[in-house]
Amino acid sequence: MNTLLTNPKRDAPPSSGLRRLVSIIGPNGPIPVSRSTWWAGVRSGRFPTPVYLGNRLTAWREEDIRKLVEEGVPRPGLATRSGGKR
């Protein structure tokens, strides 16, 4: 029996619960944005609101993150130039 095989159920994120930011963004998570972009998206409503568990402990609901990944990350509106020739 090969002990190097991974258990897909164990390696998959849980279907409910809370996730810390490090498991959501950047190279470790499904949303490839920086920390500052994430927080700007939270403030604007583009990303889900967090659950504050203490003064220095913030997390997000797993259901909200799964929904965000399934529906696709909303892109901000593209800025347009005004008053210039193209």
Image (cartoon, rainbow, N blue to C red):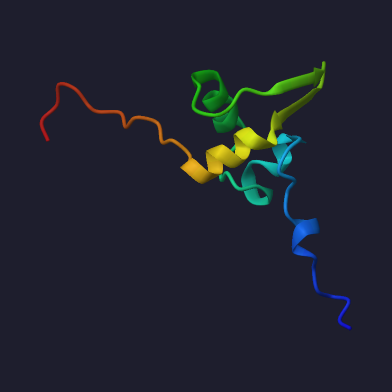
At horizontal 77% and vertical 58% (from top left) the residue drawn is 9
Tell which of 13 and 73 is nearer to you.
13
The quarter holding residue 52 reads: top right
Tell which of 56 and 45 is nearer to you.
45
The percent coordinates of residue 7 (x first, y second) are 80, 65
Q: Is residue 33 visible?
A: no
Give the quarter of the figure containing the N terminus.
bottom right
The quarter holding residue 80 reads: top left
The percent coordinates of residue 84 (x first, y second) are 14, 26
What is the number of callouts on the image? Answer: 0
Instruction: Specify the farthest residue to the bottom.
Output: 1
The quarter holding residue 6 reads: bottom right
Instruction: Specify the farthest residue to the top.
Output: 55
Query: Left of 49 or right of it: where is 10?
Result: right
The percent coordinates of residue 24 (x first, y second) are 66, 41
The percent coordinates of residue 54 (x first, y second) are 83, 18
At horizontal 65% and vertical 47% (from top left) the residue drawn is 29
At horizontal 19% and vertical 22% (from top left) the residue drawn is 82
Tell which of 68 and 23 is nearer to you.
68
Query: Left of 18 or right of it: where is 31?
Result: left
Query: Left of 82 or right of it: where is 34?
Result: right
Tell which of 44 and 70 is nearer to you.
70
The answer to whether residue 66 is above or below residue 41 is: below
At horizontal 69% and vertical 50% (from top left) the residue drawn is 28
Q: Is residue 23 visible?
A: yes
Give the quarter of the figure containing the C terminus.
top left
Query: Left of 76 or right of it: where is 3?
Result: right
